[in-house]
Image (tube, helix red, strand yellow):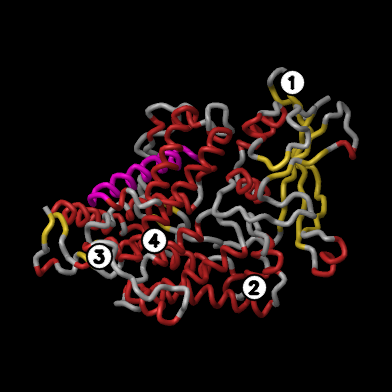
Amino acid sequence: MAGPLPDWLGWWSTADYHVARAVLQRGFGALYALAFWGALRQFRPLLGEHGLQPVAVFVARTRWRDAPSLFRWRYSDRLLAACTWSGVLLGASVVAGLPQAGPWWVPTLVFLALWWLYLSLVNVGQRFYAFGWESLLCEAGFLVAFLGSDVVPAPFLMILAVRWLLFRLEHGAGLIKWRGDPAWRDRTALYYHHETQPLPGPFSWHAHHLPRWWHRVEVVGTFVTQLAVPWLLFLPQPFPSVAGVAFALTQGWLVVTGNFAWLNWATIVLAVGVINDGTWAWLGRLLPFVPDDVPPATAAAASPGAPLAYVVVVTAVALLITVLSVRPARNLMSRNQRMNASFEPFQLVNAYGAFGSMTRRRDEIVVEGTLVERPGPDDWVEYEFRGKPGPVDRRPPQVAPYHLRLDWLMWFLPLGHPAGWFEVFLRRLLEADPPTLRLLRRDPFGGRPPRAVRAVMYRYRYTTPEERRRTGNWWARERLGVVVDAVQLAGGSLRWPPE
């Protein structure tokens, strides 16, 4: 039964976040659909029955309480396909607004299903799902689940929870930079970032060649936005809206200059989710492309009515979030701050951060193959990846918000991160395994198995503007040496090196 709330509960609901709720629900519905679509295309060759790090092996050596997942019941590529297609369809239904048209519990059940299905992927995804934006998608999906439908008012407790998530996301990133690499404190970090970031975008070359004084201004702006502005989220309106606009603008610059999967887009959705309807109306009077009337879609926003069950459920969830926030809050205050960490296996309240250390040189592993039995120096041909640098004349592509998991882990290889999966990857190339080859941009052998493969280290740098004009190349590279000598398949096993 819905009805007016008691006077002492008048603060519980709000009629001033109609646009925010719509953006949060539809935005994360779209991101979930994208994430499940990516899993549909990549999970099987990376983690499936014949993958580089099979789920079944991981499940056999870990416990439920450490990584709860649907796939602990059983894993099969067919079940994986069913789950990912379900996620795509559920996310698309939210974008279309279908669950929001029903009772308050319909979008709740849809988002909880999305959260559980995606958590099930993350908790068995090992290194291929060990990114901060995975935890962010899980946590945000759980929060958005309790924003209700269009027939009930938005609960202010969940709006506050969104602000708390956005605070940890931005402030955690600022603190990890300030406490981490001295290049941030001496304002030189962005001399390197655009060139050495994991997956540069089509405008990263241009950003790198901006004047150095601009890069120093960028660092100062980063610290202002991530260390000072987040505190506005805890003040009355319009201060949270001002913070939301600032976050959205700065994240937009990161979208233009890099490829960080859906991290920046999720942050933009959260930032817009703290802007109230009054601010949208004010912006509409200033900017011609923003509507200056923000009417509620239903009578829900005009009335404080809410079902008692909805009030009880949301209040209980808010209390749970409060309890689980203790360790992440302590982490923010700690000198030994953890970056992109979860403190409980359901990833409901997490710690975030990015680029606490700055890579100053770009070393890339280039994988080569040959069809020649006894190859000479000119008989090796390069495999091309979809997003990471390869041929020097190829402009870095725009791939975000899509997440190229193999390309990202290839970036970590030269940094010394453990990579037991890489040996399996080389084996799959020698087998000309079709699902693995579909992860790549180009197989130079057209589906034929190569005689041997190897890995060569190169040091990459952006060309100068003069080099770019003269050669047309975006990159210049120097060969550092072979890091994995030529290997062949022999009786189903790798032979290092071939005779």
Q: Residue furthest bottom?
A: 286
Residue 326 picture location, percent across and down: 31, 59
Residue extending farthest left: 6
Q: Which residue is found at the position 61% from the left and 36% from the top?
A: 420
Residue 445 falls in image quadrant: top right
Question: Which amino acid does the dot numbered 2 rest on?
Answer: Thr
In the rendered image, which residue does mark 2 sit on? 188
Q: Which residues are magenta?
A: 102-126
Type of amino acid at the residue the image marks with label 1: Ala
* Left or right of 86 in this view: 409: right
Residue at disc 2, secondary structure: loop
Identify the residue position indicated by label 4 in the image: 23
Please indicate, yes or no, whether residue 485 appears anywhere in the rendered image.
no
Numbered disc 3: secondary structure? helix
- Residue 236: x and y, percent? 29, 77
State the mark number for residue 156.
Answer: 3
- Residue 328 placement, left or right of 133: left
3 or 1: mark nearer the eye: 3
Q: CA distance from mark 4 to mark 3?
A: 16 Å
Q: Earlier in the sequence, mark 4 or mark 3?
A: 4
Q: Locate the C terminus by quadrant.
A: top right
Mark 3 or mark 2, which has the lower sequence index?
3
- Say which element carries label 1: strand
Gap in angstroms between the C-alphas marked 3 and 2: 41 Å
- Please report whichever mark, 4 or 1, sits nearer to the chain's N-terminal start: 4
